[in-house]
Amino acid sequence: MMPHRLIVEPIVRAALLEDISHGGDLTTEAIVPVSRGARAKIVARKAGVTAGVEAAALAFELLDSRTQFEIHARDGERVQPGQAIVTIEGPARALLTGERTALNIMCRLSGIATATRALVDLIESYPARVVCTRKTTPGLRVLEKYAVRCGGGANHRFGLDDAVLIKDNHLALTGSIADAVAAVRERAGHMVKIEIEVDTIEQLREALETSVDAVLLDNMTPEQLAEAVAIVGGRVTTEASGTITPERIVAVAAAGVDLISSGWLTHSAPALDLGLDVEL
């Protein structure tokens, strides 16, 4: 489900303000009469998975509430080159002024959804789920994580305040896994999950002696992951992380982990090529 409008609207407004906050749309306002209406379509230039259709439409609506939309491909659907995703009809000025903001949002989110779907499809015969991380574009996390879900993936924690992840730098400042887990367990509420990052089998064994809920198996080979999964024996959730690529993900999934996290999905996935075509 698309994040609530109360969350999305400030993001879209901020994006629009980047374009028009210093004097409006100089080009469009000089050329296009206020009374001129227009019709346009956002069209896929390449194959992919859509995400952010309603957020993109909001860019036009915020510029002029008279704008109307017909959605042809909803978020999470696969599209082919030349396929229309949404038709926009209304005041021409709103269509032209909102074009780049709408496309920036949709291209970015659809690129993430497309990349996620590619990984999900590769491991569809395994029970492991693909999840994202906090390696997101500042200000866009809620939309980028939504795009991961549109691609068939799932979300890791949204921030530092909804789950505990004890990483290597925490351990460097704490002294031991047991001390770190005990300190967090004493402070965190009973609804908060605790995950700990481990780099070696020895660390894994130490972590399993504590009350953690999940272990992040960081930068392990598929062979090490399989050994780790056998040691865990289903007692806690296992998550593999580190250099998760299309070439490597099948071997990682075959090791039997529950989750495979990839920061690449939200920090480096290429945008999906989309365009807006005005119909004369």
Image (cartoon, grey):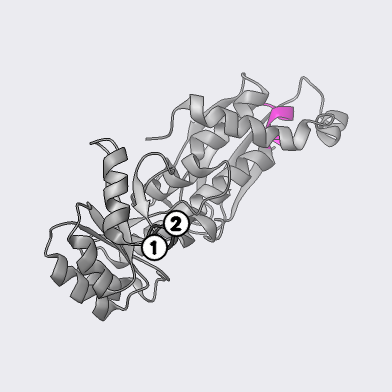
| Amino acid at the residue labelled 1 | Ala
The quarter of the picture where residue 259 lies is bottom left
Disc 2 marks which residue? 114
Magenta highlight range: 91-98
Q: On the picture, is 14 further left or further right than 238?
A: right
| Amino acid at the residue labelled 2 | Thr
**CA separation, marks 2 and 1?**
6 Å
As displayed, is residue 236 above or below residue 249? above
Q: Nearer the viewer, residue 224 or 120?
A: 224
> In this view, which residue lies farthest toward the right?
30
As displayed, is residue 53 above or below residue 34? below
- Label 1: how many Cα within 10 Å (few below 14, some 14–19, many 20+): some
As displayed, is residue 21 above or below residue 222? above
Quarter of the image for the C terminus: give it.
top right
Evaluate whether residue 85 shows in this view. Answer: yes
Quarter of the image for the N terminus: give it.
top left
Disc 1 marks which residue? 118
